[in-house]
Image (cartoon, rainbow, N blue to C red):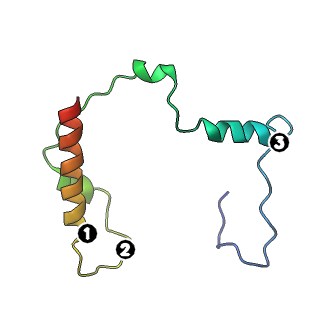
Amino acid sequence: MNRERPLTETDPPPVSTATAEEPVDRLEDDLERFWRAGEELDEVEILIEPSETPLELLEQLGTSPFERGSFPLIGFLVTTYDKVSRDALDRR
């Protein structure tokens, strides 16, 4: 649901998304298996290749929405991206 403003205390409570076709019990079952991978996952082909320019990729996301502080966020993200990528490549 797209709202113009955040909810306030005077707003009515949100309407449940459960329907007669999808009782709450079914939704709870879906939550129980949400993080479990199905058998089809083995059929997914994942090609992992090293990125030559992680900084350029991160810069494509645009300006950070966070207030600029003393901590170099973009440098941290580049380092994290590099370490995660290296780990993924080592595991392939």
- Residue 19 is marked as 3
Q: CA distance from mark 1 to mark 3?
A: 43 Å
Q: Give SS at disc 2.
A: loop
For mark 1, what is the residue? 73
Residue 42 point in image, percent of width and height: 41, 20
Residue that protrudes farthest toward the left in the picture = 52
Among the 4 quarters of the image, the one containing residue 26: top right
Kindly report the distance in space between the C-alpha atoms of the residues bearing marks 3 and 2.
Answer: 39 Å
Mark 1 or mark 2: name the one nearer the start of the chain.
Answer: 2
Callout 1 amino acid: Leu
- Image quadrant of residue 76? bottom left
Q: Which residue is under mark 2?
A: 66
Between 51 and 4, the one lying in front of the other is 51
- Numbered circle sitting on residue 84: none
Give the residue furthest to the bottom: 70
Q: Is residue 22 above or below residue 67?
A: above
**How crowded is the residue under tag 3: few (<14 C-alpha within 10 Å), some, or many (20+)?**
few
